Amino acid sequence: MQKKTDIIIIGGGVIGSSVAFNLLNDGYNGEITVFEKDTIYEFSSTPRSAGGIRQLFTTAINIQISRYSLKKYKSFPEDMAINGERTEIYFKQRGYLFLAKNETMNQLKKQMELQRKYGVPSDLLTKQELLTVIPELTINDLEGGLYCKEDGYLDPYSVMQGYAKKAKQLGATYIYEEVDTILQDDKQGLTGVRLANGDVYHAPIVINSAGPWAPALSDKIYLPLPIVPLKRQIIQFDIAEPLTNELPLTVDPTGVYFRHEGKQLLSGFSEKVKPGIDFAWKRSFFMEQLWPILAHRINNFERAKINGGWAGMYSYNTKDQNAIIGEHPKLKGYYIACGFSGHGMQQAPAVGKGLSELIRTGRYETLDLSPLCFERFSENRLLIEGAIV
Ligand SMILES: Cc1cc2nc3c(=O)[nH]c(=O)nc-3n(C[C@H](O)[C@H](O)[C@H](O)COP(=O)(O)OP(=O)(O)OC[C@H]3O[C@@H](n4cnc5c(N)ncnc54)[C@H](O)[C@@H]3O)c2cc1C
């Protein structure tokens, strides 16, 4: 079967669905076809994310992206309402907190100054002030922390479904089939995609937002991306003694992070793993890598019971751990939106808006996302972000 459409989006996760929504919401009147291979999003990165939303970044572009996205997530339930029914995303603005030892306090101070330049109300807390946020915290080995009370966490699956449902309402077509390959020929350049079932869809624009599978698709057309899938585990647990306050998403100086999930807690850590798709999670990850640190940081975590866990994939940019956004310089009409590593949830609204502008008008209008272009790798303009989780 051969079909024609105007824009093809490969991957209907939070990024692909945000792009589809933004294009249509901004008045694009062509036909948008989204291909999604996982009918229940079982293995997609989005529903396996920790859902942390923070403006506590160290580069101007990431700070601005998160600031824009935070504004959009605040009004998401109304903006994405369907027939008057709100789209809940359970955004808990309980803050985001990086704990610090003496040697990193100066860096955090510089980060705060940059964040404030862009309007982010971040605060450098002394170790005593940390106790106003988490009274049970062990502070003897800490010097303080960087805190933003506007930040927090949300339900990633609800955000993704909110975008997808609204995009469909505005006219996007979702086809739950796998794209086998992007098609191009010597004369015409990009021509569309072929599905695993053999169907061919023609379009002058193809957006690769296939998350951890994006590099494999690009490899097939000899346009490799510096991205690998990397396993990240999250463990959910109960504690015997509840905490006084609802937690911000808190990052220990070791990199172990934790937050409330209802009455339970969840925690994760970017362990060293070999690249590759792997969804196995292990209780030993909690016992050996998380629990000793958690129990030291908050005494209440000492008596903990694991309730479950999961592993998800980062689409990890091996060069600078930041997203790669924009048209590929070697193939007209081929757009990429991948490599988000651990911060795609908080970038989805801004990236959707940016790609909508770039595709419709040829330039970024709301936020200049060009620092995230693919060309930065060959032009020696890596975007070094100091706050990677
Ligand atoms: C454990 C974990 C914790 C995280 N925590 C945070 C956090 O706290 N904050 C934050 O901002 N980010 C976090 N992230 C990162 C965030 O989840 C991702 O950056 C984001 O979800 C990426 O969205 P995506 O749409 O690019 O990818 P995905 O959600 O993976 O969507 C890509 C889609 O493409 C589909 N697809 C792939 N190949 C094909 C094909 N050939 N044909 C058709 N469909 C295809 C897949 O099925 C998938 O649904 C975390 C990630 C993990 C794994």
Image: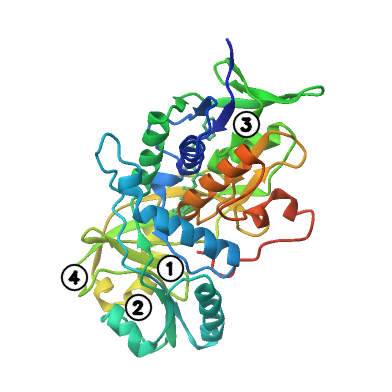
Cα gap from disc 3 to disc 2, whole angstroms: 47 Å
Q: Residue at x 54, y 77 (%)?
A: 111
In the rendered image, residue 294, in percent from the top left (x then y), is placed at: 35, 72
Residue 256, disc: 1
| Residue sitting nearer the eye, 259 or 97 | 97
- Please name which of the two marks, 3 or 2, marks the residue nearer to the observer: 3
Cα gap from disc 3 to disc 1, whole angstroms: 37 Å
Residue 128, disc: none
Residue at the disc numbered 4: 242
Relative to 294, does residue 48 appear above or below in the rendering?
A: above
**Label 2 CB sits under 8 Å from any ligand 1 atom:** no
Category of crowding for the residue at label 3, using alpha-carbon neighbours closer than 10 angstroms: few (below 14), some (14–19), many (at least 20): many
Category of crowding for the residue at label 2, using alpha-carbon neighbours closer than 10 angstroms: few (below 14), some (14–19), many (at least 20): some
| Residue sitting nearer the eye, 114 or 23 | 23
Cα gap from disc 1 to disc 4, whole angstroms: 20 Å
Amino acid carrying label 4: it is Pro
Name the N-terminal-most of marks 4 and 3: 3
Name the N-terminal-most of marks 1 and 4: 4
Residue 206, disc: 3
- Please name which of the two marks, 3 or 1, marks the residue nearer to the observer: 3
Residue at the disc numbered 2: 297
Q: What residue occupies the far top of the structure in this picture?
A: 1
Q: Which residue is drawn at 24% across and 74% down?
A: 300
Q: Which residue is drawn at 73% across and 55% down?
A: 376
| Residue sitting nearer the eye, 33 or 385 | 33
Cα gap from disc 2 to disc 4, whole angstroms: 15 Å
Amino acid carrying label 3: it is Val
